[in-house]
Image: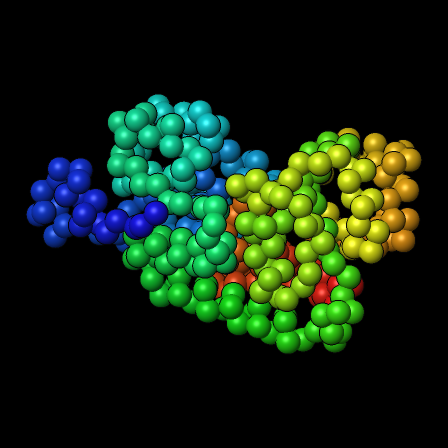
C-alpha cells in the first residue's frame, strides 16, 4: 500500500487541476469505516466527518474519543450510505478488510485504501508508515511526526527504566476473551507483539497466528504456560466475568491460582501502535498498549 497524493487522487477522479487552487484540506472532512484509521486521524487532529459504529469503537478502542460532531454511519460492514451521502466527505478511507464496500462507497466520494497488518511486514514500521501517510493526506505531517517521535521516545524510556534483566522477567500471554471458554492469544504480527518487542519483553505465545496476529484457542491451552503472566485485555463480553468466577477450569490455571495476571483497559487489538492512549488534551502520545499513565506504572511494576 502506498499513499496517493492529493494531486494524483484528483487526476484519477477526473477532476480539473484548477480545483487544487481552491481546495483546502484544513476544511476537508474524512470518513472511515476502519477504527485503526479513525484512531490515527484523531491522534493527529485531522477533521473527521463520519466514523462507523461509534459506541462499539468507544467500548473496544477507548481513546482517542471521536468528536461529537462526527456522524455515525452505522455498521462497519454495512454502512448507512444514505446518511453518509447527506454530507459527503472529501474522501472515504478504508483498509483491505473492507474492500468489498468500495463500489458502493465510491458513489459518494473517492475511496482510498490503506494496508494494515500485512503478512511478512514489520508491524511497528507499518504503523509508522500509516501514520505518515495519513499525515500527508490530511496535511498533518508535523502532528504525525510528533506522534511517532513521542511514541518512540516513550518506548525507549520504558525499556530503559526496567529494574530486572530480561532473563528475570516472566513471559507474557496477551489474551482477549471471546466467551468464557475461548480467547484470542496474540503473537507474531500483532499490535501487542510489536510493542513487547519494542520494550524487549518476552511473549510466551510461540504458536502460529493468523494474518491479524492472534490464535483462537480454548482457555485450557493457557495451562501450557505455567510460568507466564496472563495479561487480559478488556472489555470482557457480557457475563464472562461471572462465568469465570464459577469455572473450575479457569480457577485451576497456574496464572490464576498464583495471581499472576493483569487486566488492561480497552485497547483496539488491531489498531495503530502509535495511537493507543493518545492524550488529546495535550496533543502528546501517552502509552502504547496501556491506556493511562497509572495503568502503565501498574503494568511495569508487576511485569518488570
- Decide if residue 178 is on the left or right side of residue 244: left
Question: How many numbered marks are there?
Answer: 0
Within the image, what quadrant is residue 136 found in?
Answer: bottom left
In this rendering, the answer to whether 147 lies above or below 271 is: below
Task: Indicate whether 247 appears above or below 289.
Answer: above
x then y, percent, for residue 236: 71, 38
At a point 44% along the width and 35% down the height, the residue shown is 97
Residue 6 sits above or below residue 250 on the image:
below
Q: Is residue 80 visible in this depiction of the protein?
A: yes
Q: Measuring from the top left, give residue 138's x and y in whole percent.
A: 31, 53
Q: Look at 60% across and 74% down and name the residue there.
A: 157
Between 205 and 16, the residue placed more toward the observer is: 205
Q: Position of residue 287 (x, y in %)?
A: 59, 61
> Is any atom of residue 58 visible in this view?
no
Q: Nearer the viewer, residue 289 or 30?
A: 289
Give the left or right position of residue 162, taking residue 100 as reference.
right
* Quadrant of the image containing the C terminus: bottom right
Q: Position of residue 275 (x, y in %)?
A: 51, 55
Q: Is residue 49 above or below residue 289?
A: above
Q: Residue at x 37, y 58 (%)?
A: 132
Task: Examine the image and state in which quarter residue 245 appears.
Answer: top right
**Colour setup of the view:** rainbow
**132, 209: nearer the viewer:** 209
Residue at image location 72% in from the left, 61% down from the top: 299
Task: Give left or right: position of 275 versus 232.
Answer: left
Amino acid at each position: 500500500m502506498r499513499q496517493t497524493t492529493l494531486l494524483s487522487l484528483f487526476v484519477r477522479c477526473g477532476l480539473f487541476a484548477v480545483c487544487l487552487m481552491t481546495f483546502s484540506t484544513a476544511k476537508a472532512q474524512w470518513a472511515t469505516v476502519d477504527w485503526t484509521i479513525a484512531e490515527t486521524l484523531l491522534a493527529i487532529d485531522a477533521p473527521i466527518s463520519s466514523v462507523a459504529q461509534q459506541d462499539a469503537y468507544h467500548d473496544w478502542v477507548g481513546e482517542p474519543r471521536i468528536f461529537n460532531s462526527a456522524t455515525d454511519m452505522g455498521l462497519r460492514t454495512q454502512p448507512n450510505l444514505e446518511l453518509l451521502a447527506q454530507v459527503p466527505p472529501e474522501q472515504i478511507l478504508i483498509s483491505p478488510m473492507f474492500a468489498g464496500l468500495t463500489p458502493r462507497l465510491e458513489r459518494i466520494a473517492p475511496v482510498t485504501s490503506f494496508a494494515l497488518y500485512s503478512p511478512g511486514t514489520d508491524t511497528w514500521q507499518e504503523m509508522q508508515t500509516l501514520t505518515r501517510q495519513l499525515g500527508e493526506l490530511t496535511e498533518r505531517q508535523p502532528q504525525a511526526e510528533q506522534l511517532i517521535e513521542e511514541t518512540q521516545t516513550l518506548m525507549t524510556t520504558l525499556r530503559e527504566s526496567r529494574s530486572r534483566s530480561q532473563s528475570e522477567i516472566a513471559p507474557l500471554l496477551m489474551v482477549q476473551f471471546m466467551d468464557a471458554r475461548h480467547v484470542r492469544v496474540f503473537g507474531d504480527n500483532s499490535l501487542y507483539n510489536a510493542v513487547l518487542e519494542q520494550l524487549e519483553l518476552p511473549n510466551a505465545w510461540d504458536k502460529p497466528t493468523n494474518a491479524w496476529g492472534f490464535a483462537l484457542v480454548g482457555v485450557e491451552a493457557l495451562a501450557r504456560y505455567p510460568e507466564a503472566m496472563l495479561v487480559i485485555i478488556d472489555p470482557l463480553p457480557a457475563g464472562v466475568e461471572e462465568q469465570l468466577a464459577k469455572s473450575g477450569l479457569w480457577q485451576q490455571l497456574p496464572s490464576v491460582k498464583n495471581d499472576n495476571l493483569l487486566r488492561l483497559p480497552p485497547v483496539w487489538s488491531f489498531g495503530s501502535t502509535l495511537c493507543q492512549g493518545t492524550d488529546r488534551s495535550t496533543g502528546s502520545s501517552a502509552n502504547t498498549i496501556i491506556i493511562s499513565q497509572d495503568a502503565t506504572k501498574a503494568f511495569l511494576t508487576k511485569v518488570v
